[in-house]
Image (spheres, grey):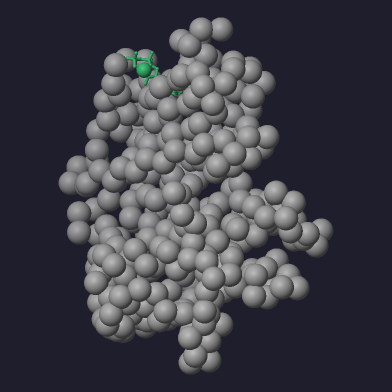
Amino acid sequence: MGEFELIKRFFWRDAAEDAHTGVVLGIGDDCALLQVPDGQQLAVSVDTLVADVHFPASAAADEIAERALRVNLSDLAAMGAQPLWFTLAITLPETNEDWLRQFSHGLFRAAREFGCALVGGDTTRGPLSITLQVMGAVEPVQALRRDGASLGDFVLVTHNLGDGAAALAMIEQRLAVAPEHQAYLHQRFYRPVPRLREAQLLRGLASAALDISDGLVADLGHLCAASDLAAVIDVDQIPLSPALQSLADREQALRWALTGGDDYELCFTVSPEKMSAVAMLIAEGQLEAKVIGELVAGSGVHCEREGDAFQLTETGYQHF
Ligand code: ADP
Ligand code: MG
């Protein structure tokens, strides 16, 4: 099977089906032609996932694909953007039709769920690696940037932290998990939920935001640096899932929540003036989020427990 036939069989879609997202010309020409909605800005992000670095090469192909797209969409969510399109550059060690069929199935399942269209890509041979570029639209001024936080703003996170790292430990058989929590953790790793809905609620309310991919301390550190402030976090306020709370080693659970990667939750800041509106969304059950600290003068992320410094041994995932 040649490259062109492979693309045609597994990745080609009828562009007419995607016309509602602004696809004028999809896969098949030298470039795609895309219409950005009137008056909106284009948000663009790209990520590469390498087999055995970012996911186990032996994982099911549909789960690899779903995870790849969901992780990328998390970046759009963190910007307050609505997904529209994506491209796929895939490097394959061989042409395995079963694997490709499964991969394509997972990819389009996630694409359908989040309403974004595959509009182009590149296909090459080599060690398995997947590069996705996602594109979305955001109203000017409403983007959730990292540099908008102010002194005294509250720091919040959505849902709970630490599941990503615990799930990876479970998948790599470094962690024994009670049977009732296994399915939950598996899907937290392979099917992370881009917090698009939450981000839409936070437009105009959050002063700054990002998604947590490399661990809370590392990522909140980026927000602090961009906003020229420090953060003080009360580690006992960090939300943990029932699965993580059930682990015997509570310090390990907390370490995963603070420095583990792969959570894809939002970390965002809210000014004291806007906090009541956010608290209302939380109380009404529209937004699952929790205050874990605040922004102060200085630099870096400082973790505390009952008012004392809480010492960390690791500070998040470093690629190099
Ligand atoms: P070119 O030589 O102009 O780069 P290619 O032969 O690489 O063109 O690709 C042909 C068409 O198929 C292009 O429209 C390209 O965007 C699309 N394409 C290639 N690989 C993929 C892929 N993995 N997924 C989606 N579209 C792809
Ligand atoms: Mg090409």
x and y, in percent, of residue 140 in the image: 20, 54
Give the side of residue 315 with respect to residue 80, left or right.
Answer: right
x and y, in percent, of residue 156 in the image: 43, 74
Residue at 43%, 29% in the rendered image: 88
Observer-nearest residue: 155 or 302? 302
**From this viewpoint, which residue is outermost toward the left?**
39
Image quarter of residue 14: top left
Residue at 49%, 57% in the rendered image: 317
Residue at 26%, 25% in the rendered image: 33
**From this viewpoint, which residue is outermost toward the right?**
179
Query: How many numbered marks does the figure carry?
Result: 0
Observer-nearest residue: 83 or 154? 154
The quarter of the image holding the N terminus is top right
Residue 280 in view of the camera: no
User: In the image, is residue 86 above or below residue 213?
Assistant: above
Image quarter of residue 128: top right
Residue at 63%, 40% in the rendered image: 56
Give the side of residue 260 with respect to residue 151, left or right.
Answer: right
x and y, in percent, of residue 66 in the image: 56, 40
User: In the image, is residue 217 above or below residue 16?
Assistant: below
User: In the image, is residue 281 above or below residue 23?
Assistant: below
Observer-nearest residue: 103 or 140? 103
Residue 251 in view of the camera: yes
x and y, in percent, of residue 46 in the image: 37, 40
